[in-house]
Amino acid sequence: MTIQYHHSNARMSQIAVHNGTVYLAGQVPSDASADMRGQTEQVLARIDELLAEAGSSKEHLISAQVWVTDMAEFDQMNAAWEAWVVPGRPPVRAALEAKLAKPEWKVEIMVIAALPEA
C-alpha cells in the first residue's frame, strides 16, 4: 500500500493518507491572541481545509484527540467543537489537559478521517 504525505518537512507531515484513511498532524491556532473558543475555531477551520485537501471532510471523522492547556476553559473549547461537529456523526474523542509547545497556544487538535467511498 502506498502512503501519501503532504505539507512535509524534515520533522513531520501535516497530512498522511493510507488505505482510505486520512491522518492529520496536531493543529494549533494561527492567532494565539484569541480566547480558547476563538483558538479552537481557528484549529477546526484549519482541519476543514486539510481534510478537504486530502479528499475528505468532518462528515467522515473517525477519531479526535484534543489537548487543552487549562481545563477551566474546557467548556469554551467544547462550545466551538459542538458547533462544528456534524450532528449525529461525532467521532470518538479523547480530551486532555497538557502543556503545549508554545505557552500562548490554548488548544491542539489531531484527527483521523476516512476517505468517502467512491
Image: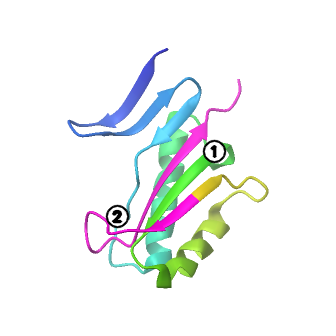
Q: Position of residue 92 (x, y in %)?
A: 65, 53
Q: Quadrant of the C terminus?
A: top right
Residue located at (53% from left, 64% from top): 95
> Which element is circle 1 on?
strand
Depth check: give the residue in front, 78 or 47: 78
Residue 104 within the magenta-colored segment of the rendering: yes
Q: CA distance from mark 2 to mark 1?
A: 25 Å
57, above or below 72, in the image: above
Disc nearer the start of the sequence (2/1): 2
**Circle 1 Cα neighbour tier, 10 Å, few/some/many (<14 / 14–19 / ≥20):** some
**Circle 2 Cα neighbour tier, 10 Å, few/some/many (<14 / 14–19 / ≥20):** few
Q: Residue furthest right?
A: 88
Q: Position of residue 34 (x, y in %)?
A: 39, 78
Residue located at (54% from left, 41% from top): 52
Instruction: Tell me the magenta residue range.
Output: 94-118
Nearer mark to the viewer, of 2 and 1? 1
Residue located at (54% from left, 51% from top): 48
Q: Position of residue 105 (x, y in %)?
A: 33, 70
Left or right relative to 116: residue 78:
left
Q: Quadrant of residue 6?
A: top left
Left or right relative to 83: residue 23:
left
71, above or below 41, in the image: below
Q: Are marks 2 and 1 in contact (CB under 8 Å)?
A: no
> Which element is circle 2 on?
loop
Depth check: give the residue in front, 5 or 31: 5
Can you tell which mark lies on residue 30?
2
Left or right relative to 31: residue 74:
right
Kindly identify which residue carries mark 1: 62
Residue 29 within the magenta-colored segment of the rendering: no
90, above or below 60, in the image: below
Q: Position of residue 108 (x, y in %)?
A: 42, 62
Identify the amino acid type marked 2: Ser
